[in-house]
Amino acid sequence: MPSAFHICVATADPSASAGLLVDGARCAGFDEVRLSWQQAREPVAGVKVSGVDLPALTAQGREDFERQVDEIATRMKTASRGGIGVVSIEGGARNAAVLEFLTDGLRRLTGLADELGLVIHVRNRYGTRLEQPPDMHGVLADVGADDLMAELDVAEFHRASVNPCEPIWGLEKRIGCVRLSNVKARRLTAMAAGEIDMPTVVEALQTVNYGGPFVLFLGDDDGAVDRLIEDRRYLKKILGQ
């Protein structure tokens, strides 16, 4: 893994205000954030925005599909005008109709991304069409765009009873971003204190020479900023920095 890496901050709750995210990130000494699509509607100043999480592609019918793709395309254009280079998308429910529309939509949107100079990440989430590693492999292969990347959320794989190292070993050079958070009894906790073996996850990333960004998460409790500082310290330690 490269000696230089960068870490940005997102909120554990995507509906939290952008102001809360920016204030928490700056208090913890970060200068880069990742916005939810709700937060992207708000003005953000004093930090770099490294990416925006777009609404999920959940359509199960043609009319909904066209509406959702148009909405996502509009948000992509807004992100591009704002100098943002990365957007990420989730899938909808785990059924065949959603899978068909997800792949069709991504084919269309990757073409637009090329025109706008954007990179699209597809991200896993428990209970969605992109829950399991084979889901990620299948969508990346079916869309067929070399610059469509996987964004791996370690805690969401854990929630889906998946060893987070499995998608790392399988996707290797297609990993565009890694979301690192730890949980205990399904609640966000300090990275060093949860159910996920973070040193093993980082070792797997080092094995495949991952060189992309990490996203850490800001909670909404009184100790959230202190925990974020400690999470960064712990991550640097297990990275050997």
Image (cartoon, rainbow, N blue to C red):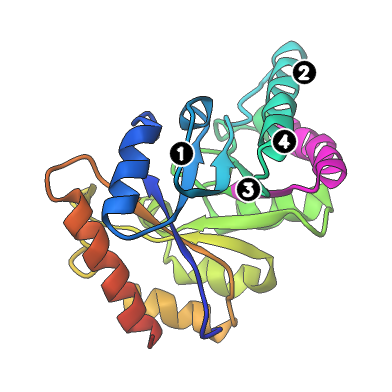
The residues tagged by marks 4 and 3 sit, at their Cα atoms, a distance apart of 21 Å
| Residue linked to disc 3 | 122
Q: Is residue 35 left or right of residue 169?
A: left
Q: Eyeballing the image, is 191 above or below 13?
A: below
Q: Amino acid at mark 3?
A: Val
State the residue lying farthest toward the front.
Answer: 46
| Residue linked to disc 2 | 66
Q: Residues within 10 Å of mark 1 (few under 14, many from 20)?
A: some
Q: Which residues are magenta?
A: 100-122
| Residue linked to disc 4 | 81
| Residue linked to disc 1 | 127
Q: Amino acid at mark 2?
A: Glu
Q: Amino acid at mark 4?
A: Arg
Give the percent coordinates (x, y) of residue 222. Answer: 12, 44
Q: Residues within 10 Å of mark 3 (few under 14, many from 20)?
A: many
Q: Circle 4 sits in a helix, a strand or a loop, which is it?
A: helix
Counting the numbered discs, the total is 4
| Callout 3–callout 1 Cβ contact below 8 Å | no
* Residue pictured at 79% horizontal, 37% vertical: 109
Q: If you read the primary sequence from the N terminus, does the residue marked by circle 2 or circle 1 appear first?
A: 2
Q: Quadrant of the N terminus?
A: bottom right
Is residue 67 a member of the stretch shown in magenta?
A: no
The residues tagged by marks 3 and 2 sit, at their Cα atoms, a distance apart of 19 Å
Name the one closer to the observer, 117 or 208: 117
Q: If you read the primary sequence from the N terminus, does the residue marked by circle 4 or circle 3 appear first?
A: 4
The residues tagged by marks 4 and 2 sit, at their Cα atoms, a distance apart of 23 Å
